[in-house]
Amino acid sequence: MKDMFQTISPVDGSVFVERPYAGDRETAQALARAAGAQQDWKWTGIAERADICRKAVQYFLDHAEVIGEELSWQMGRPVCYTSFEIKKGFQERANYMIDIAEQALADIGIEQSAGFRRFIRREPLGVVFVLAPWNYPYLTSVNVVIPAIMAGNTVILKHAQQTPLCAERYAAAFQSAGAPEGVFQFLHLDHQQVAAVIADSRVAHVAFTGSVEGGKAVQQAVNQRFLAAGLELGGKDPAYVRADAPLAFSIENLVDGAFFNSGQSCCGIERIYVHERLFDTFVEGFVDLTKQYRLGNPLNPDTTLGPMVRASAAAAAQAQVQEARQKGARALIDPSLFPEHRDGTPYMAPQVLTGVDHSMLIMTEESFAPVVGIMSVKNDEEAIRLMNDSRYGLTASVWTQDVEAAQHIGGRLETGTCFMNRCDYLDPALAWTGVKDSGRGCTLSALGYESLTRPKSFHLRTGV
């Protein structure tokens, strides 16, 4: 095992961060601290937990601009957007889960019978091990970190090696908030070390966000124990633009849904089905708006499309585009319109393809890149069939002015979330979950607390 790892910035290929992996002794000490702290933390009142978590959130808000620039260097998102991961989504999700904790974690009262008192209590699991990705390092991790701590668990966070400073920021936030030692910790680990932590009996729950292959590795490790794991994996999320869709609105939001964060979002738009009556007009507007993006150095405030996370990721996406073109697809964006586009680098121009079908990887396998395929469909039935023709099932969106139609179509879609006239957004009041190869389990909403607690029944005979 190597002693150190490096974070190579997609901005310029430089080494932005270098950190040592945690040693065996450091890892063992972290687990011992987490398990010991949890024995006290679970008895801490919800109001006190909330106070500490709110102070931690405030730390992030106070440092949002600096954190945003760090994030741009680590994973390439334009600096004009990065701080909003903290100011908007992170804050919204964290505060919502804090606000609902008292009610969501309250005892469940059962109708009383003569001589008995009965209720179900939600008890914390213990130590929660969170494995977070690089693409939205704060938005994905906050879904578990805050509610896990609010529920009375302690947390050990392992962030992707591309974004190690995010884990360190969490530690600084909870230290600033006055959290007891051991309630939150992070570890920089390699894959073998991750498996060893999962195998440790002190870990009570694993929450993983990442690739399908990564999810399989976590599941394999989890299978050695009677342990639950939440798995948020990949997506190939579709959109359907019905004949009655608000056209300009749909174009604007679907372009953003496809290309924000350089398409590196598990719930980003990767394939679009458009009713044949709108197809030509939709494609024309979609292409025109795509050409308005500015690809470049993400530290430039005028940049709206940054580099992908690494050159190999851009090359994989370009290979999907090439395969589709070889099978007859038409690429509608000339990369020369984006002077910063360079083969062999993370800087990749956006691409829009038509003439696509489901024999092409661009329509079936996750691209995780600023590329999207657009198909014409005759009716709702064809759209539903094609949207469900995927091994993934995270989100799908329907663009229409008919709410009843959207609900009907949504009821037939094999996804965890169905949107109408929006996409690529997590409402913290709603359960975030996937089906098929998009994973299992649930975060956010009151239901998100269910996977972070266990039920304990109290059956008390009174008056004896």
Image (tube, helix red, strand yellow):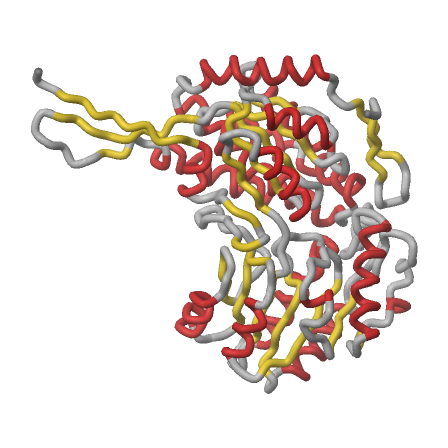
300 is higher (above) or lower (below) than 412:
above
- At horizontal 81% and vertical 49% (from top left) the residue drawn is 298
Note whether 444 is above or below 393 in the view shown: above
* Residue sitting at x 66%, y 39%: 217
Outermost residue on the front side: it is 224
**In which quarter of the view is residue 276 placed?**
bottom right
Instruction: Determine whether 228 is above or below 84 in the image.
Output: above
Q: Residue furthest bottom?
A: 277
Residue 418 left/right relative to 199: left
Q: Nearer the viewer, residue 51 or 464?
A: 464
The answer to which quarter of the image holds residue 366 is bottom right
- Residue drawn at 66 percent across, 53 percent down: 265
* Residue 448: percent from left, percent from top: 45, 41
Residue 158: x %, y % from top left: 66, 30
Q: Nearer the viewer, residue 394 or 85?
A: 394
Q: Is residue 96 left or right of residue 163?
A: left
Along the line of sight, the residue nearer the viewer: 345 or 328? 328
- Answer with left or right where residue 55 lies relative to residue 118: right
How many numbered marks appear?
Answer: 0
Quarter placement of the N terminus:
top right
Percent of width and height locating residue 101: 40, 34
Q: Is residue 107 above or below residue 216?
A: above
Q: Quadrant of the C terminus?
A: top left
Q: Nearer the viewer, residue 353 or 390?
A: 390
